Image (tube, rainbow, N blue to C red):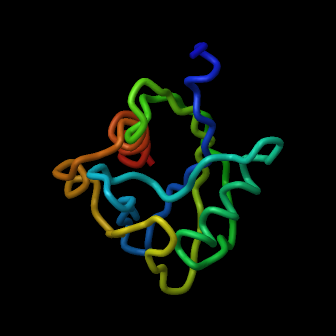
Amino acid sequence: MSAQDSIIRIAAALIEDEEGRLLLVRKRNTDAFMQAGGKMEPGEAPEAALVRELQEELGQLPDHLEPLGIFTAPAANEPGHQIEAHVYRACMTGELQAAAEIEELCWVTTEEAELLPLAPLTRDHLLPLVATV
């Protein structure tokens, strides 16, 4: 496997509620909590991928997306792979529900999040980002 083959390109959403809590999800048969989102299809723009994934995983379309940057981290559920994550702040209204491969979702403060098993992207890049905003 080449280094290029070991990179998984994803789009992920940083979603906060009106109380400043962060939405984290856990996929079925996994332990790590992470942001909602997922892999981009070949030729798919990151924003389009995220809109599709949020509809599939949470049952809602985002009202607004704001790009926050591109981050790299070890993949949480695919050993030996790295993710390249296009991260957006997503504004969502309505009740979000776990769907598709999402087993569980939770709203947590950054302090509560630190007590959970977290994906490297969430732990190393996004929690620090939320703490500074």
> Which of the image's four quarters has the N terminus?
top right
**Residue 83 point in image, percent of width and height:** 53, 33
Residue sticking out furthest to the front: 1
Q: Is residue 38 above or below residue 85?
A: below
**Residue 121 point in image, percent of width and height:** 42, 38
Q: Is residue 42 above or below residue 36?
A: above
Residue sticking out furthest to the top: 2
- The residue at the point 46 percent across, 80 percent down is 97
Residue sticking out furthest to the right: 43
Query: Foreground residue, 95 or 55?
Result: 55
**Residue 4 point in image, percent of width and height:** 64, 19
Residue 76's image quarter?
top left
- The residue at the point 73 percent across, 53 percent down is 47
Q: Is residue 133 left or right of residue 37?
A: left
Q: Is residue 96 above or below residue 106?
A: below
- The residue at the point 55 percent across, 24 percent down is 6
- The residue at the point 58 percent across, 27 percent down is 7
Q: Is residue 60 above or below residue 123?
A: below
Residue 10's image quarter?
top right
Q: Is residue 57 left or right of residue 118?
A: right
